[in-house]
Image: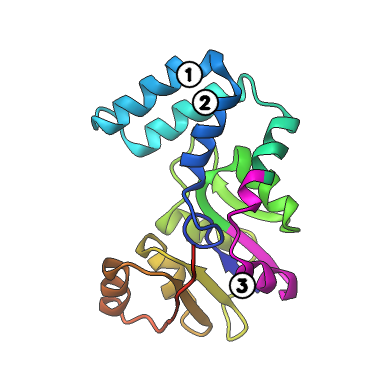
Amino acid sequence: MLIVDLDGTLVDCNSFTEFVKFLFRRYPQLRWRLASVVLKRKLRLISHHDAKERVVALAEKCVDETALADFSEQLLHHVRQSLRDRIERADRVILATAAPALYAVPFASMLGISEVCATEPGRGENMGERKLRDVERRGARFNAETVVITDHYDDLPLLKRNSAGKNILINPSAATLMHANMAGIRFDVEVEKS
């Protein structure tokens, strides 16, 4: 089984930033409201999660399946080939991400991933312990055959839980390496080109 993070891991970008840009280009009527949310976030007047909730609420009013498919196609250009290959070889794949389910689910579907743990509107951000619980609710078994791939220490709960399996950090920052080492987690590092 393969459990893989999205932003900075499966894709070499921040999918939410790309989604906001996509909405800005595609829906001129949303530009002022999007700009307002982005500005409030930049000024730290609202949290990252609150900004995400507001953008998703705006998007849900106008995006349709065609738009989500178009965005997913754009995001496919950011998929790391080595991870695409792993996904194709895996018997089971769970995409575990803090990204909004609104686009994470159709994007995953394009890659042949049917199981997605993502941030749902009105719930907390799907990260840390919440992400671990979400993955476990799907019946994930952590054993010697399980591989967890991420780029960020936000996923320490998943990495710790996978102590019998293989943990891979993709292009980890110094902070991520420090946190993983301090937690006593065994892991391999893979450096991928963007």
Whether residues under marks 1 and 2 lie with C-beta atoms below 8 angstroms apart, the answer is yes
For the point 31% across and 74% down, which residue is it?
177
- Which numbered disc flags the more N-terminal residue, 1 or 2? 2
Q: CA distance from mark 3 to mark 2?
A: 31 Å
For the point 28% across and 32% down, which residue is it?
42
Report x, y in % for residue 98: 48, 49
Q: Dot 2, crowdedness within 10 Å: few (<14), some or many (≥20)?
A: some
Inspect the magenta stretch and tell me whether residue 93 lies in it: yes
Q: CA distance from mark 1 to mark 3?
A: 36 Å
**Magenta-tinted stretch:** 74-95
- For residue 70, above or below residue 112: above
Rendering colour mode: rainbow
Query: In this figure, which residue is indicated by the disc labeled 3?
Result: 82
Query: In this figure, which residue is indicated by the disc labeled 2?
Result: 24
Q: Identity of the amino acid at label 2?
A: Phe
Apparent side of residue 26 relative to residue 32 in the rendered image (left or right): right
Whether residues under marks 1 and 3 lie with C-beta atoms below 8 angstroms apart, the answer is no
- For residue 193, above or below residue 96: below
Whether residues under marks 3 and 2 lie with C-beta atoms below 8 angstroms apart, the answer is no
Query: In this figure, which residue is indicated by the disc labeled 1?
Result: 31
